[in-house]
Image: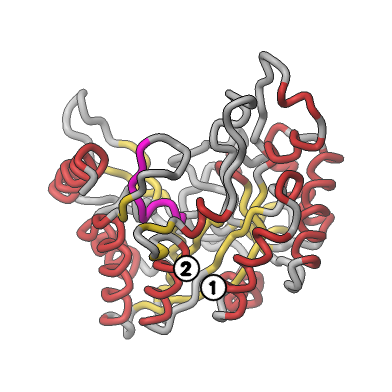
Amino acid sequence: MKTEVCITIDVEFSIAGAFDSPNRFAPLSEEVVNCVVDGREQGLGFIMDSLGQHGFSGTFFTEALQTAYFGDAPMARIVERMASAGHDVQLHLHPCWLYFRNSAWQQPGFEPNDACSRRTDAELDEMIGLGFEAFSKWGLPPPVALRTGGFCTNLAVYQAMARAGLDLASNIGLAVFEPSEPALQVWGGQHLVDGVLEVPVLSYRTPGFGPLMPSQWRLLTITSTSNSEMESLLLAARRSGVQSVVLLTHPFEFINQRGFRYDNLRKNGVNQKRLLHLLEFLEANSDDFVVTTFDKRRRDWLEAGTVTTPILHTPLRHALLRTAQNVLNDFLLV
């Protein structure tokens, strides 16, 4: 059996400083996703073109609560492109967008809360319901999978999902947010939680190098993982019999910007090369790996239930090279 690789993309708009300076800034929508540089899309367009060149499909976790500010039209244009290209579109929720339903967000001292893990059962039910409504208005079938914003999750989220009939989740990225419940402190594999199957974005361990560089969790993303680390992790997963590996990216990872207003953009050459290298590696090693989506694997995953996976590590030399490369990318705008 081949190792399954799910390339997931979080598609979301940006608050862009509106909560901090409501009199100066407004949220941004399609420009955050398209990321146009010199008349060419370096965000969503680059991702979709790259996947299409290799015949691969991705799972696009699409944020729905921004409709409280932007209405249905901006994201509708985006999801139409993704769905018409044959990609899997699933639900993503950032609760902070719901503050725009009243004027409290414009008051001094306002502190937004963007964590699904800090919401009541009634609030969770409402948010998921709003997500279903958005998908219907966008002309999409109901979602079958959810990813919470910032990976902020707890057991109450899974119970709300079960009430709504959502049976797949990718709410956990241990390197980004560690849930308080031990049952949710998982780094990969598949885990049945209150009737919902959680398939986390893979978190892996980096090597320690003395007190100044301790071993730590790192999330499998294009931005945080070099080509050599990505290959090493995938090959280790294959050798260990890991059934599925989920990785994450965002359209904005493929551009460099100064500030948060999406002006003065440049394409991010390092990250673009990383995605292209990953896709080429997966195609060249198709005897061992298959690129799939949450929707395609849903039935088989649910039938298999909980599947644990060993902790994966990256070699020190790869981590050091990635650190140097990322420093150059961040500060020299490679």
Which is more toward the observer, 209 or 79? Answer: 79
Based on the picture, tell me whether residue 331 belongs to the magenta stretch: no
Q: For the magenta stretch, what is the residue range?
A: 249-258
Q: Is residue 223 left or right of residue 246?
A: left
Q: Give yes or no for contact between labels 2 and 1 (Cβ–Cβ under 8 Å).
A: yes
Colouring scheme, one of rainbow, by chain, secondary structure, one colour: secondary structure
Of residue 57 and residue 97, the one placed in the foreground of this image is 97
Does residue 54 lie above or below 106 as drawn? below
Q: Name the residue beneath numbered marker 1.
A: 293
Q: SS of the residue at dot 2?
A: strand
Secondary element at image label 1: loop
Taking 156 as reference, is 21 above or below it? above
Where residue 6 is drawn, which disc sits there? 2
Q: Position of residue 28 (x, y in %)?
A: 57, 45
The residue nearer to you, when weighing 306 against 217, is 217
- Within 10 Å of disc 1 (Cα), the crowding (few <14, some 14-19, many 20+) is many
Residue at 51% from the left image edge and 51% from the top image edge? 32
Mark 1: amino acid: Thr
- Marks 2/1: CA–CA distance: 6 Å
The answer to whether 259 is drawn above or below residue 142 in the figure is: above
Q: Which amino acid type is shown beneath numbered disc 2?
A: Cys
Q: Name the residue located 54 percent from the left edge and 73 percent from the top edge.
A: 293
**Residue at point 68%, 14% (across, down):** 108
x%, y% of residue 41? Answer: 42, 64
Q: Position of residue 116 (x, y in %)?
A: 69, 39
